[in-house]
Image (cartoon, grey):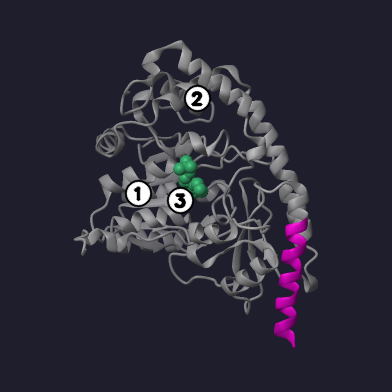
Amino acid sequence: MKYGFSKRVRYLKSSAVRDILKVVNKGDVISFAGGLPDENLFPVDAIRRAFDQALTSDRKNLQYGETEGVMELRERLASRMATKGIHRSPDDILVTSGSQQAIDLFSRIMFNRGDVILTENPTYLAALQVFESYEANIIAVDSDDDGMLEEDLEDKIVRLKPKCIYVVPTYSNPGGKVWSLERRKKLLELADKYHVVIFEDDPYGEIQFDENESPPSIASMDNNRLVLYTSTFSKTVVPAMRIGWIVGPHQIIRLMAQAKQASDLHTNSISQHALIHLLKDFDFDGHITTLRKTYLERMNMMKSLLDSVEGNQIKYQIPKGGMFLWVNMPEHVNTTELLSTAVDRGVAFVPGAPFYVSNPQQNTMRLNFTNAEPEKIKLGMERLVTVINESQYEFIT
Ligand code: PMP
């Protein structure tokens, strides 16, 4: 049978990371590849109680619900965001099936074929997948460790007239970096000057290692209704509940809600009601503190083992939060090629190349430090360091 698919399927791509995960999640390979939280830290008892309460308190919790999301959840989200300087009404919030759906719905209502979207390079792979599926023209802006470079950003805004600038400014995926305050302000200033919408994707903002170092979100500095801000409970509660949200200009949120109606009517109601109970009865902030502490210890452990690579030839920036260490190997190393040797030795990572919009750096890799427990991190990193050392030796001889 020959199926008559739409032209659009040409732009659907399988994620290189998901393809790698299928291979490495087998046998005794220790994987630093996925962007996964640690399931041993999931607050299972509290989640069970919250679902129990959601199921027994009102049968309507199992009914169809509002597309925008359960009002009480949106109210709680609005007050939680207010404590972080984002002051918006619950009517400006759309509850989504994870942040991923927020990226998709936004793209659906914004992009025509060829519309330009500016991003960092590298950036979140699954956002690139979405933008490509809507045939947007993704252009990378030059950046350094502090964020996008002003000159290149302004030049590309003026020349290419983008519809949107997509950024993950806080503990990014994959780079693990955090934009400086100056660069955040500059981005906002330029977006304002040229009337461009900013899409701020912030799944990792809560996973912050230094209490005193809390960069304000770009949305919290926005007085001109330019920023859409999305976050999620995937990293702080569990990904399986599939609850994220997006807040921003009401006109955009309203259209996104219409697109959501056509897509899935509404986000899973019982998960939303359970989450309301969880936020009421469980020490959510205490849980986040535990996550921060545990993940910081793991990052430090991974980092100190990386430091034992011979010859000090690898470079990385110490993450201030989030879930990833981004490693630059010596120029001659191709991490895609290195991966198969590493998997044979029982350890996996994600090669950096697929995260690039253009000019992929083949010598980069992303290491996740949150999923594996300390003994596994130790063993996995010993394996990885051996593979790296051998690859350098091969080059030298
Ligand atoms: N944005 C970024 C930058 C991410 O890393 C992720 C998760 N990998 C998401 C969005 C989507 O998260 P979720 O759909 O689980 O909320």
Mark 2: which amino acid? Answer: Leu
Viewer-nearest of labels 2 and 1? 2
Mark 2 or mark 1, earlier in chain? 1
Mark 1, residues whose alpha carbon is within 10 Å: few (<14), some, or many (≥20)? Answer: few
Task: From the viewer's perspective, tell me whether residue 179 is left or right of residue 106.
Answer: right
- Residue placed at 21% from the left, 63% from the top? 1
* Any part of residue 212 in sight: no
Mark 3: which amino acid? Answer: Val
Residue 278 sits above or below residue 210 on the image: above
- Residue placed at 72% from the left, 46% from the top? 373
Residue corresponding to mark 1:
193
Where is residue 288 drawn, in percent x and y? Answer: 64, 32
* Any part of residue 355 in sight: yes
Residue 315, quarter of picture: bottom right
Residue corresponding to mark 2:
275
Task: From the viewer's perspective, tell me whether residue 116 is left or right of residue 372.
Answer: left
Q: Which residues are magenta?
A: 379-397
Residue 177 sits above or below residue 93 on the image: below
